[in-house]
Image: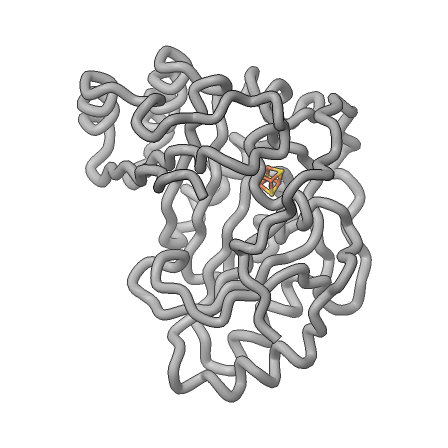
């Protein structure tokens, strides 16, 4: 039943094309969650918990560094059955602490709140990975989740060039403020590819986040392979950040960390 997050589509990535973002984009209307992948055990995707990860199908964006091309279309080629996953999770309830809804973009799917409630009814804590494209839908699930990993990609004005979608940065800061106001435990994190986010813009983003009240911030070096946009130069580990930049950013946040990319595989 399991299909790992790390099974990544090789080649065949769609072209990077700017397209307009409709207001609140149309949700994926399905009675049950459309699941494109599942990891039965992770120790790194939900801090402090042993967790399973549900990879929700569909994303409104086409980030140039995306590693999950197979999760971007709204329909999965080989979707996993949500009912069967719930049966599996019921059996594992004594072994796991939590379930993370990741993607793709989980808030794209109208079935997400019901899916979260179903998982909570089994006794699990729930984590959510989101990039914040849908503030209203994020607001609707904040009271249901125990932790949010918020993917903040760049400064709002620079979003379109990274995501391939016009005006995609418009609602991200609104989502970020909703999360900060909610009191839900969270982490903000930014994936850094040197072609897409230089040191000056990263400093500007970090200062803006600190001014908003972000306390926990992590940088993730882009995995140097399998980017959606094959024209991106392979990022060498350590090439995005220099010690002075790391020191300056670290001084802005009480809790700051850097996740280095591993060797290319
Ligand atoms: S938001 Fe995430 S899943 Fe969607 S295109 Fe960007 S990196 Fe990929």
Q: Quadrant of residue 216?
A: top left
Foreground pick, 145 / 80: 80
Q: Quadrant of residue 2?
A: bottom right
Q: How is the image coloured?
A: one colour
* Residue in view at x 33 percent, y 58 percent: 47
Outermost residue to the front: 265
* Residue in view at x 36 percent, y 53 percent: 185
User: Dividing the image into 4 quarters, which one contains the C terminus?
Assistant: top left
User: Dividing the image into 4 quarters, which one contains the N terminus?
Assistant: bottom right
Tell me if residue 126 comes above or below residue 160 in the rendering. below
The answer to whether 55 appears left or right of 220 in the picture is right
* Residue in view at x 70 percent, y 65 percent: 33
Residue 137 position within the rendered picture, expressed as x and y whole percent measured from the top left: 64, 49
Tell me if residue 69 comes above or below residue 52 in the rendering. above
* Residue in view at x 35 percent, y 57 percent: 44
Residue 165 position within the rendered picture, expressed as x and y whole percent measured from the top left: 70, 26
Tell me if residue 142 comes above or below residue 66 in the rendering. below
Tell me if residue 162 comes above or below residue 71 in the rendering. above
Foreground pick, 110 / 51: 51
Residue 214 position within the rendered picture, expressed as x and y whole percent measured from the top left: 33, 35
The answer to whether 254 appears left or right of 237 in the picture is left
């Amino acid at each position: 039943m399991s299909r790992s997050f790390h099974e990544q589509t090789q080649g065949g990535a769609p072209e990077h094309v700017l397209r307009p973002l409709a207001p609140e984009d149309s949700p994926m209307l399905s009675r049950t969650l459309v699941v494109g992948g599942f990891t039965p055990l992770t120790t790194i995707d939900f801090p402090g918990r042993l967790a399973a990860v549900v990879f929700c199908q569909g994303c409104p964006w086409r980030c140039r560094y995306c590693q999950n091309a197979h999760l971007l279309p709204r329909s999965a080629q080989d979707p996993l059955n949500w009912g069967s996953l719930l049966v599996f999770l019921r059996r594992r309830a004594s072994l796991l602490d939590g379930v993370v809804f990741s993607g793709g973009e989980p808030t794209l799917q109208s079935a997400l709140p019901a899916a979260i409630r179903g998982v909570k009814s089994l006794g699990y804590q729930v984590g959510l990975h989101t990039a914040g494209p849908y503030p209203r839908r994020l607001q609707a699930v904040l009271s249901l989740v125990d932790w949010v990993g918020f993917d903040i990609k760049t400064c709002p004005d620079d979003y379109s060039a990274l995501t391939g979608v016009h005006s995609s940065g418009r609602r991200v800061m609104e989502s970020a403020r909703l999360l900060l106001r909610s009191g839900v435990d969270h982490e903000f994190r930014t994936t850094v590819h040197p072609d897409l986010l230089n040191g000056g813009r990263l400093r500007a983003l970090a200062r803006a986040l600190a001014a908003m009240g972000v306390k926990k911030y992590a940088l993730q070096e882009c995995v140097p392979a399998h980017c959606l946009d094959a024209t991106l130069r392979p990022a060498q580990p350590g090439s995005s950040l220099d010690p002075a930049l790391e020191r300056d950013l670290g001084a802005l946040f009480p809790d700051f960390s850097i996740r280095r990319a591993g060797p290319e595989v």
